[in-house]
Amino acid sequence: MSRSTMLATISLIPLLLFAAAAVQASTVTCESTNNEYRSCPVDTRGGVRLSRQLSTKGCWENDTWGFDRNKIWVDRGCRAQFQVGAQATSTTDKGNALAAAAVVGIAAAAIIASNQHDDHHNKNYNKNYNNNYDNRYDGRYDERYDDRYRNYDNSRYGYNGYGGDPRRTFTCESRNDRRSYCGIPGRGHVEIYKQRSSSQCRHGHSWGVEGNSVWVAHGCRAEFAVY
Amino acid sequence: MVTWKSLMGAAVLLGTAAANAASPPPAGQPVDTAKAMLDRMDRNLDGKISLEEYRNAMIRRFGARDVNDDGVLEGDEFPKEWLAGAAVEGATGKVSFEQFAAELPLVFDGFDADKDGQLDAAEIAAFAAARKTQEESRS
C-alpha cells in the first residue's frame, strides 16, 4: 500500500465511523408490561436518550430504566421511546414543535400569528396536527387502561385541574444496611417519591415490592408514593 | 426567535401549574412558586429539577386529567387552567398524550438557560416568575 493510499484510507476512517453512527441512529420502544422487567437488545454505544415517555408510571434512570452496552431495560411499568446512537439533542423538528405547541393553545395562536406570512407552513402544520391526532394510539399499549390513575375527586377536578399527586405517601428506611419491610397503605402503583438517602435506591437492588409490602436494603431510605 | 419565545410561554403553562390536591389554592390566586415546584418535582432533594423529574411530574398530571383514559384531553378534560392568560379561542382544544410527552423535553430546554439538564434555583425562579406574569396578564 502506497503512502498516499494509506493516508487516504486513514483519512476515510472518521468519515466511515461517522456514517455508521448516522445510520445507527434510531428510535427504540421498550415497554415494561405488568410491571415486569424487560430488556430490549440494542447497541447503545452511540448513546441513549429517553425521547418520549409513554407511561404515566415513572421512568427513572438507573431505577426503572437504564442501559448497558447491549441493551436498554425498563421495569415497574416504565414504557418509553429511546433515541439510540444519535447525538442530536432534540428530535422535535419545527413541524412537530408546531404541532406540539397546538397542545397549549396560546403558543399555537402566537406562532400562527407570527407565521401569517407563511401560508404554506400553516397548512402543513394543520395537516400534521390532524395526522398526529388520528394516530395517537395504535393499540399496542394495552396496559394504558390500568396505567392511568384518576383524580380522586372528579367532581372537583375543574377547580384547578392540576392533579397528579399521589394518593398516599409513606417512608421506608434500611438501617445498618439491612433489609426492612414496610406495609403499603392502600392499593395502587408504588414508586419512589423522594429519595432521602445518599445511597441510591434502585429497584430490584435496594428496593422492591413484595405483596402488600415495600422492602428497602443497602441503605436506601425513601418516601414512597402510592398512585 | 419567535418560536422559542412562544414555546417558553407554553412551558410556563405546562410546567408551573403545581398545586397540591390536598390543599387547593384559592381560586384565581397564582399557585406556582419556586418552592411549590420543588416540593412537587424534586425527587432527589438536590434543590434542582431535572428533565426526568419534570417529565414524570407532568406526565402524572396529564394522566390524572385524562379521566376517560383515552389518551386525549378534550372537552371538560381540556386543561384551560394550564393555559392561564391564553387566548384559547382558535386553538384545537385537544391535547394528545403523545404530543404532550414529546413536547416536555422541548419546553424544559427552553428554561434550562445554561443547558446543564437541570433547572437550578435561578432557572426555577425565572420559570415561576414567567408563570406569575402569565397569571397577571389574565386579569
Image: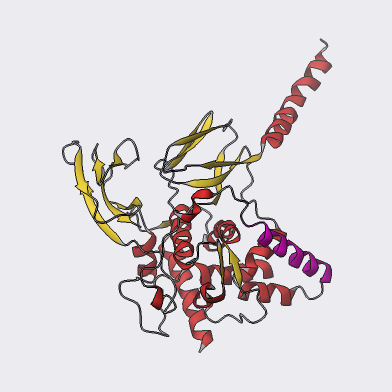
Q: With respect to residue A50, does B102 lie above or below?
A: below
Q: Is residue B1 visible?
A: no
Residue B105 shown left or right of residue B38 in the figure: right
User: Can you name the residue that lies furthest to the bottom here?
Assistant: B139
Relative to the observer, which residue lies in front, A4 or B82?
B82
Q: Quadrant of the C terminus of chain A?
A: bottom left
Query: What's drawn in magenta, residue-wise?
Result: A119-136
User: x, y percentage for residue A120?
Assistant: 83, 67
Give the total number of marks visible in the rendering.
Answer: 0
Going 50% across and 62% down the picture, which residue do you hit? Answer: B69
What is the magenta segment's predominant secondary structure?
helix
Q: Colour scheme in the image?
A: secondary structure
Residue that protrudes farthest toward the top in the picture: A1
Up-down: is A63 above or below A53?
Answer: above
Q: Identify the residue at image location x=54%, y=28%.
A: A70
Q: Residue A41: x, y in percent? A: 55, 30
Residue A26 is left or right of residue A200, and the answer is right
Judged left or right of residue A69, residue A213 is left
Please provide percent x and percent y for residue A171: 23, 53
Pick whichever, A164 or A154, lies toward us: A154
Horizontal arrangement in the rendering, residue A117 relative to residue B134 (left or right): right
The furthest residue to the left: A176
Q: Is residue A134 magenta?
A: yes
